[in-house]
Image (tube, rainbow, N blue to C red):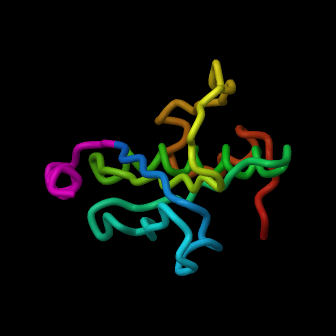
């Protein structure tokens, strides 16, 4: 946490990634649960990244991540916090490669324009 606060004061863009269990399991005495959303507030803005189970969820998370990454470069640079809930504890990790993701250059994402068309979704209104 001190490193995130220092990055905020020095305007250093840094990404903090945390993992916990889904919000529905918090407060139910389920193992490995700890509410982490906004754990770094006010020093880093937090995005809750949901587990992807559908193509629409993938598009929504792409937009969420594009917004998060664009925030890295606002106001001269700032830290962000990505919190990724995992429904089942990782006792065994069998994934051999990560999925391909569409990454926006910071200049496109941080100019204040609507970026939803660039990640292939229609924003919810």
Check if residue 12 falls in the magenta segment.
yes
The image position of residue 26, as x and y in percent, is 55, 74
Direction from residue 44 to residue 22 in the image, left or right? right
Residue at point 36%, 47% (across, down): 16
| Residue drawn 57% across the image and 79% down it | 28
Q: Main secondary structure of the magenta part?
A: helix
Vertically, is 32 above or below 90? below
Is residue 33 rendered magenta in the image? no
The quarter in which the N terminus is drawn is: bottom left
95 and 44: which one is in front?
A: 95
Specify whether 79 is left or right of 97: left
Q: Residue 48, percent across and down?
A: 55, 60
> Residue 27's x, y, as percent?
53, 80
Q: Could you tell me which residue is drawn at 48 percent across and 61 percent down?
A: 32
Quadrant containing the C terminus in the rendered view: bottom right
Q: Is residue 99 above or below residue 113?
A: above
Q: Tell which of 81 and 86 is nearer to you.
A: 86
Quarter holding residue 85? bottom right
> Outermost residue, bottom direction?
27
Looking at the image, which residue sits at the far right?
55
Q: Left or right? Give the position of 114 relative to 90.
A: right
Count of residue discs: 0
Magenta-colored span: 1-14
Kindly identify the residue that appears in the image at 60 percent across and 52 percent down.
86
């Amino acid at each position: 946490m001190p490193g995130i606060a220092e990055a905020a004061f020095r305007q250093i863009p840094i990404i903090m990634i945390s993992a916990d269990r889904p919000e529905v399991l918090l407060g139910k005495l389920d193992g490995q649960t700890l509410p982490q959303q906004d754990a770094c507030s006010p020093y880093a803005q937090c995005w809750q990244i949901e587990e992807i189970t559908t193509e629409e969820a993938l598009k929504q998370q792409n937009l969420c991540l594009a917004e998060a990454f664009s925030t890295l470069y606002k106001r001269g640079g700032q830290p962000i916090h990505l919190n990724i809930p995992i429904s089942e504890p990782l006792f065994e990790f069998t994934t051999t490669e990560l999925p391909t993701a569409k990454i926006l250059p910071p200049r496109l994402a941080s100019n204040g324009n609507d970026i939803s068309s660039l990640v292939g979704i229609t924003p919810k209104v």
